Amino acid sequence: MKKLILSIVALAAISLTSCSSDEQTNDLQGQAQEQQVSNNTRKAALAELCSVTSTSITVTRWQAPSSVDSNWTPVSAAIGGVNVQWEGIYGASIRPTGNAAQWYVGTIALNSSCDEWDIWKANILVKNASANLGTAPTDPYNVLGYHGTISGSNYGLGYYSYDISTHIMTPARAIVIWKTSGTNSQSVTSPSSATEAYLVKVTAVTPGTSSSTISYNWTQVL
């Protein structure tokens, strides 16, 4: 009788151990499946978010010389959910305008990619920061074009360089446009507080006799 009781107890212990092991296995499998679903969802979201749109726009010069900002007629465009205008010399400067919300601009390394927004957003150079402002154009806030000083005009932070002798414009930085709370176009804001953001890369600026074509692509990063 004693042996029978011991046998029953042993079998019960084995059964309990087996059930516990099965439950742990099921839990681990469930966690792995949840992680896989989460990863797949994130990849799908990134694929949709990081879709690249390539386009171009032509800006015309209404009078000579080309080196005067106001001689170029601004042209409006939309980049995702933000309205911008291309303006200034050869129409290569970009400025958010005509939006209900506040949008701001800055630059980042040209090789920055959409799926690494969380990594490089802290490295964005903000145009409205005092150290990055120039004295040109007439409204030097929240606009990106030529980088530095040329022909006596200081444009501050920009995204392209220009060789006067060859008339070649070379994009050196990517443009970032983000939406966040701010008082006006002169506010200094942090991209880290953005609720929506776009990465813009100008691929070519092709000057003509009295017009200029800006080719670029954009990607929503947030």
Image: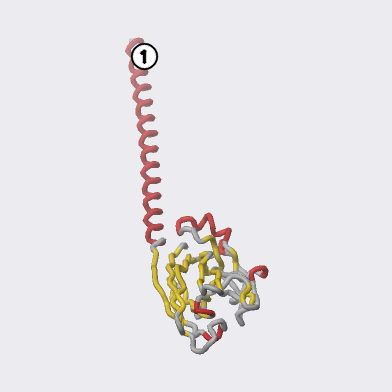
Q: Position of residue 32 (x, y in %)?
A: 38, 41
In terms of image quadrants, where is residue 50?
Answer: bottom left
Q: Position of residue 180 (x, y in %)?
A: 55, 69
**Residue closest to the far bottom:** 63
Which residue of the protein is positioned furthest toward the right in this rendering? 130
Task: Name which residue type carries label 1.
Answer: Leu
Look at 36% across and 18% down and name the residue there. 10
Q: How many marks?
A: 1
Q: Which residue is mark 1?
A: 6
Which of these two is toward me, 216 or 77? Answer: 216
SS class, disc 1: helix
Task: List x then y, in percent, for residue 188.
Answer: 62, 70
| 113 relative to 189 in the view: left or right | left
Give the vertical position of 14 relative to 74 (above or below).
above
Residue 134 in which image quadrant: bottom right
The answer to whether residue 115 is above or below residue 183 is above
Residue 65 picture quarter: bottom right
Residue situated in front as seen by the camera: 24 or 116: 116
Residue occupying image coordinates x 52% and y 69%: 179
Callout 1: 10 Å neighbours few (<14), some, many (20+)?
Answer: few
